[in-house]
Structures are given as C-alpha cells and as structure tokens.
C-alpha cells in the first residue's frame, strides 16, 4: 500500500502523551513541564517529538457555535500552549472522540468534524488522537473515522491522525483508507504484566498475545501503523519492590518486564508515546527510552512489524526484517526461571545468503559473529534482543 500523500508518519511517531501519567487531572503546566523535560532529558534529541494532551483538556460545554473550548486548567488556551511546545522544537497533539462525548464525558467531535478540524489547524495542532467513546448516533466506526479523516485532509495543516478505535473493527483493514496514520490494535495497556480479566485494560503480556494473534502485520508500514497503545515505562516498579519476587498480576512492572515492554514495542515498530511523568524520570527509564539500538529497530525505514517465529509456553522468539537485510531477533522468557533460548538464522526473518553474521546485543552493545546459531541467556520475564547483520 502507498503511504498517504502527505508523507506523514513515514516512521512510527514518537512522543509523550498525558494520559498514563496524569489521566483526567492534566493541566497546562503539566504539559509545559513535559515539553521542558523532553528537551532536558535528551528524549527530544533521541526522536520523541510529539507532546499530546489526552482527554479532559476541554471545558464541559461547547461554545455557542459548537466549538471546543479549553477548560480552566488551560488558562492560556491551546494556541499559546502549541506555541510553547513548538518553541522547544516539538510538535503539539490534542485529543477528541468519534462520538458525542469523550471517554471521560467531555464534549467531542461527532457531527462537528470540519469545525473542530479547523480549530485544531488554527491552534497549531500537529497530531490528533481520536477516541471511540460517546454515543455513535448509529454510525459505524469506518463512517465516523472517515468523517474526521476527511475533515483533517481539508484543512491547511499536516495533522497526524491517530485512530483510537481499540481494534474492535479491525482498523488495520481500513485505517489508511480513512486517512489514518496509526490505529490502536488493542484495548488500553495498564502498568501490569497481566491484567485481571475482570478489570479494565490489558497487561504487557496480554497485549503481546493479542499482537501475535491478530492478522494485522501486513497492513503495517510507512504512513500507517498498528498501535499496541502507549508506553507504561516509568510507571513501575514501586519503591521497595524486588525484581525477583513472586509474580502478582496486581503489582506494577519490574525492570525486566519494562525491558520486555520496550524491546517488543520496538520490534513491533510501534508508535512510542511515553506515558510517565517526565519530571521524575529515573535513570533506568531514561536509559531504556533512549536506547539508540532499540530506537533504530523501531524506526527502521522498511517499517516492518516483527512477528513470532516460535511461541511456546515459556519461550518466544520473534524477529523483524531490517532495511540492511539483517533482522532484530527477540528472545523472550515467559517462564519463572532463567533459561537459555536458542534459534538459528535460518529460522528468523533475515537474508540467509551469508556465511557469517554479525550479532549485536541491543542492551549491552557487545558484538560477536556467528555462522548461524543464535543463543541468549534470559532472566524470567525478560527479553534479550539482538541485531543480526549478514557479513
Ligand atoms: C480511552 C483510550 C485511552 C485514553 C482514555 C481517555 O480509554 O483508549 O487511551 O485516551 O480513553 O479517557
């Protein structure tokens, strides 16, 4: 499939979104602080460019003409906030919903797409996250998302269109055709390894299972990306929690689980929207989020989504073809004890004509050569990820 004419989102968008950090309590000063922190932490220079205000930025009433208005928590308005973000070399994003209301009950854009798209363009919005909440007035998802896609295409500004339909109606089959640049393939990711099935949201392992099961990888590529939801890195572990204590589905993510989360989102070539409070970013999280070897896999120009080569109860091997004929290969240990996972270049998505391959461990930078066999020792819930390049 051809990328959309604007050429937007040629690689998966990278940035920060307010929802996982601030939920409905978000304020203008949180957004300014996040923009400042993206610069100060080096995240902007690593490639994270979008600053997206999620739900709850709007006042509870539309104005007399049906326009959205910012709430009192955004006292200087959205154009001034967009300027603040742009002045820091970043891009600005906002949120609305393809229904009568947002998920938190604020006014949304169904039936007012053109008017709201014009507002977004006037304010200097570069990215719209468009949710699926509120009354749909009997209109199906494709129709509702196409209406905003057309409205965005009709304004005089390039706006990345992030479809947040939760994968309910296979948006990978129609997302590009309605002007989308990315579309959620899954329900909301929460900061857990496995979520309680009776509670809201999915854990990291749940999302990986879903991404392995749905047949969406073929639709994924430059200009249109499957989105396994925003990052929960930085939202665990709690202080005092040991990385090796017995697993409880209710506790937040350990460091090993966060490595798995980031490695797989990069292997999936997922949009990477950071979702933690950047004013208290730990050194561990900063290092994880700015790992250049991982980001190069995520942003590889071929734009291929990694897929599983082997999935067992305790062991998974996934790979992703890269533009240089090499591949990223992930060795994921689902079991409770450390183990060696092994595979061979002939079993992963790499060009198989070479006699020798260079292997680079994406966590340590260590390099070695192989004629074919690949093996990594991996801690429980952790993921080793290597880049394999034919010599
Ligand atoms: C839905 C979306 C989330 C977030 C919230 C906001 O749950 O899937 O990503 O935007 O709404 O209310």
Image (tube, rainbow, N blue to C red):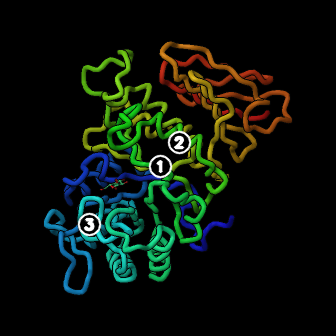
The residue closer to the viewer here, 358 or 274, is 274
Distance from the alpha carbon under mark 1 to that under mark 2: 7 Å
Question: Residue at position x 57%, y 49% from top?
Answer: 299
Q: Is residue 267 left or right of residue 356?
A: left
Q: For the residue carrying disc 2, how many other residues have a C-alpha within 10 Å: few (<14), some (14-19), or many (20+)?
A: some
Distance from the alpha carbon under mark 1 to that under mark 3: 30 Å
Q: Mark 1 or mark 3: name the one nearer the start of the chain.
A: 3
Residue 221: percent from left, percent from top: 63, 56
Disc 2, disc 3: CB below 8 Å? Answer: no
Q: Is residue 354 left or right of residue 82?
A: right
Disc 1, disc 2: CB below 8 Å? Answer: yes
Q: For mark 3, what is the residue?
A: 81
Residue 282: percent from left, percent from top: 31, 33
- The single residue placed furthest to the front in the displayed view is 138
Residue 341: percent from left, percent from top: 63, 19
Is residue 266 visible in the rendered image? The answer is yes
Q: Is residue 38 above or below residue 101?
A: above
Question: Residue at position x 28%, y 73% from top?
Answer: 79
Q: For the residue carrying disc 3, how many other residues have a C-alpha within 10 Å: few (<14), some (14-19), or many (20+)?
A: many
SS at badge 1: loop
Question: Residue at position x 70%, y 43% from top?
Answer: 321
Q: Mark 1 or mark 2: name the one nearer the start of the chain.
A: 1
Q: For mark 2, what is the residue?
A: 210
Q: For mark 1, what is the residue?
A: 186
Q: Which mark is residue 114?
A: none
Q: For the residue carrying disc 1, how many other residues have a C-alpha within 10 Å: few (<14), some (14-19), or many (20+)?
A: many
Q: Is residue 112 left or right of residue 157?
A: left
SS at badge 2: helix
Q: Is residue 318 above or below residue 324?
A: above
The residue closer to the viewer here, 143 or 364, is 143
């Amino acid at each position: 499939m051809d990328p959309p004419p604007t050429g937007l989102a040629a690689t998966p968008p990278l940035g920060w979104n307010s929802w996982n950090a601030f939920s409905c309590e978000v304020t203008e000063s949180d957004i300014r602080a996040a923009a400042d922190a993206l610069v100060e932490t080096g995240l902007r220079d690593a490639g994270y460019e979008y600053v997206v205000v999620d739900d709850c930025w709007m006042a509870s009433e539309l104005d007399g003409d049906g326009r959205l208005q910012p709430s009192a928590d955004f006292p200087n308005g959205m154009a001034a906030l967009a300027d603040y973000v742009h002045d820091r070399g970043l891009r600005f994003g906002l949120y609305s919903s393809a229904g009568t209301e947002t998920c938190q009950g604020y006014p949304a854009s169904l039936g007012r797409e053109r008017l709201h798209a014009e507002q977004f363009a006037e304010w200097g919005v570069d990215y719209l996250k468009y949710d699926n909440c509120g009354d749909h007035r009997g209109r199906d998802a494709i129709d509702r998302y196409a209406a905003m896609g057309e409205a965005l295409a009709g304004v005089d500004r390039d706006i990345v269109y992030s479809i947040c339909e939760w994968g309910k109606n296979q948006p990978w089959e129609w997302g590009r055709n309605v002007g989308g640049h990315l579309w959620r393939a899954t329900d909301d990711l929460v900061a857990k390894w496995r979520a309680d099935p009776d509670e809201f949201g999915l854990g990291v392992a749940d999302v990986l299972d879903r991404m392995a099961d749905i047949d969406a990888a073929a639709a994924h590529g430059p200009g249109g990306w499957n989105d396994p939801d925003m990052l929960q890195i930085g939202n665990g572990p709690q202080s005092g929690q040991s990385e090796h204590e017995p697993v409880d589905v209710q506790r937040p993510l350990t460091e090993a689980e966060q490595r798995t989360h980031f490695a797989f989102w990069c292997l999936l070539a997922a949009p990477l929207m950071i979702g933690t409070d950047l004013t208290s970013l730990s050194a561990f999280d900063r290092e994880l989020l700015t790992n250049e070897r991982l980001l190069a896999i995520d942003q590889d120009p071929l734009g291929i989504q990694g897929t599983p080569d082997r999935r067992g109860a305790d062991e998974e091997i996934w790979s992703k073809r890269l533009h240089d004929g090499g591949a990223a290969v992930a060795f994921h240990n689902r079991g409770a004890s450390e183990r060696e996972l092994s595979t061979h270049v002939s079993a992963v998505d790499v060009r198989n004509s070479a006699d020798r391959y260079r292997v680079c461990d994406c966590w340590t930078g260590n390099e070695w050569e192989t004629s074919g066999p690949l093996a990594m020792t991996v801690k429980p819930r952790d993921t080793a990820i290597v880049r394999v390049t034919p010599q």
